[in-house]
Image (tube, rainbow, N blue to C red):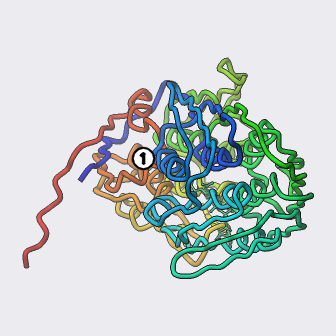
Amino acid sequence: MEMIVIEGGRKLSGRVRIGGAKNAALPVLAGALLTGGKVQLEAVPTLDDVTTMLEVLVHLGAAVETESGGALTLTTAELVNSEAPYELVRRMRASFLVMGPLLARQGVARIALPGGCAIGARPIDLHLKGFSAMGAEVVAGYGYVEARAERLRGAEIYLDFPSVGATENLMMAATLAEGNTVIENAAREPEIVDLATFLNALGARVRGAGTDTIRIEGVPELQGGRHRIIPDRIEAGTYLMAAGAAGGEVTIENVVCRHLEPVVAKAREAGLEIQVESGTGEGGNETLRVCSDGCPRAADIITLPYPGFPTDLQPPWMALMAVSSGRAVITENVFEDRFRHVEELRRLGAKVRVQGRMAEVAGVPQLCGARVKATDLRGGAALVVAGLAAGGVTEIGYVHHLDRGYANLEENLRLLGAAVGRQDVPLPEADTA
Ligand code: EPZ
């Protein structure tokens, strides 16, 4: 089995450059289906989830040309399919984001139901309720959901929960609807703003992205355009927490500090020294310099929709608190089952008590390396953070989870002085007894 092997207990030092945001790139790629024109994207991260989304787009009729350095061009002159098959949606539930664009552009969409995953049931009821409000006939059954509409019409939509995916799907659908759409209680994540910026570059009329009320004026069609994906705030936060847990001095380049406000605030509360420097890279993004002695103070977090503390950094934060000098309470408000990584952290010596949506972490002076397995993408990130801080060797299995969301992970960590590699480790013979 392929494993990431870390010889922990070393301080980190050096520079890491953050790539384009996975959770901005995926909806933007889906949005490219809305136009027959040429879409030119920059800073698209090289991740398995992006590869899967490109497979879905090609299946639907897009022509994709990938260039160097994260640039790619997509042209969907005509859609040749209206179905996203189970084998692709099963691999990545964000494939469901093609539903809005397909419905808007060709009036029909048939998508395999994405199903749940390691962090919860992940329902799509808010997406479907919104499409119905826009006049689509939605039928769900036998593992698929199908929606049809001659032409979507603008509607007033209230989201019971500020769902990121529902906001994105409905915003994309509304760009080509007849009339105006208002999405109330919309998600406010930076990735929503980035999608709106992209859609407007294609000629859409989206206003209010980043607030809880987004207004979209439907237009007859969209043109081609170009867009650069924003940096990945979750990737940046992961490296910040790695520096906090292992100790040392790390420079994190190409970040938008505004997107990391809740994370930087909590990291400072935990005793990490963080300086913000104006960026020198493209897009004028900023640089974070993180210093830590590897023994953070305990600091409670409560995950909430943006601008609250991001749920995707809850697992890495738990790993950081596992080596803190006190007790921290972690409350997970966004997903109902996002503590699968606790069992694996315990194998490294972490002291964690879980009660429903709350986990209490009692910091220990030293974690000890062990063989563990990634339960999901960010749970795997937590094990990397813990493994860097742990004494001895940590072997992390199921690394495919990490490859979905972290590009060049081992390479970046080696540049920071970590002893990390990827090895094919033979699994122990199954017990014959
Ligand atoms: C996006 O997932 C992200 N994925 C997730 O990142 C992230 O954790 C999540 O937003 C929250 O920030 C992508 O952008 C590709 P939601 P999404 O719809 O859109 C409930 C990662 O690690 N809900 O905001 O699926 C749902 O059950 C991934 O990069 C409904 O009840 O998140 C959950 O409890 C993990 N009905 C809550 O809303 C719906 O119709 C948040 O889900 C939709 C959602």
Label count reads 1
| Near-viewer residue (365 or 179) | 179
Left or right: residue 16 versus residue 408 is right
| Residue at the (40%, 51%) spot, across then down | 366
Residue type of the residue flagged with mark 1: Asp
Left or right: residue 202 versus residue 56 is right
For label 1, count other residues whose C-alpha is less than 10 Å away and answer few (under 14), some (14-19) or many (20+).
some
Identify residue for label 1: 403
| Residue at the (86%, 47%) spot, across then down | 206
Quarter of the figure with the C terminus: bottom left
Q: Which residue is the extreme one toward the bottom?
A: 141
Left or right: residue 174 versus residue 255 is right
Note whether ligand 1 is within 8 Å of mark 1: no
Q: Position of residue 226 (x, y in %)?
A: 70, 31
Q: Position of residue 241 (x, y in %)?
A: 55, 44
The image shows residue 429, relative to residue 210, as above or below, that is below
Dot 1 falls on a residue whose secondary structure is helix
Can residue 324 be spotted in the picture?
Answer: no
The image shows residue 160, relative to residue 82, as above or below, that is below
Q: Position of residue 61 (x, y in %)?
A: 55, 48
Q: Quadrant of ligand 1?
A: bottom right
Q: Which residue is the extreme one toward the left?
A: 432
Left or right: residue 55 versus residue 263 is left
For residue 154, what is the image quadrant? Answer: bottom right
| Residue at the (42%, 54%) spot, across then down | 401
Q: Position of residue 344 (x, y in %)?
A: 39, 63
Can residue 301 be spotted in the picture?
Answer: yes
For residue 39, what is the image quadrant? Answer: top right
| Near-viewer residue (108 or 324) | 108
| Residue at the (89%, 49%) spot, across then down | 208
| Near-viewer residue (375 or 136) | 136
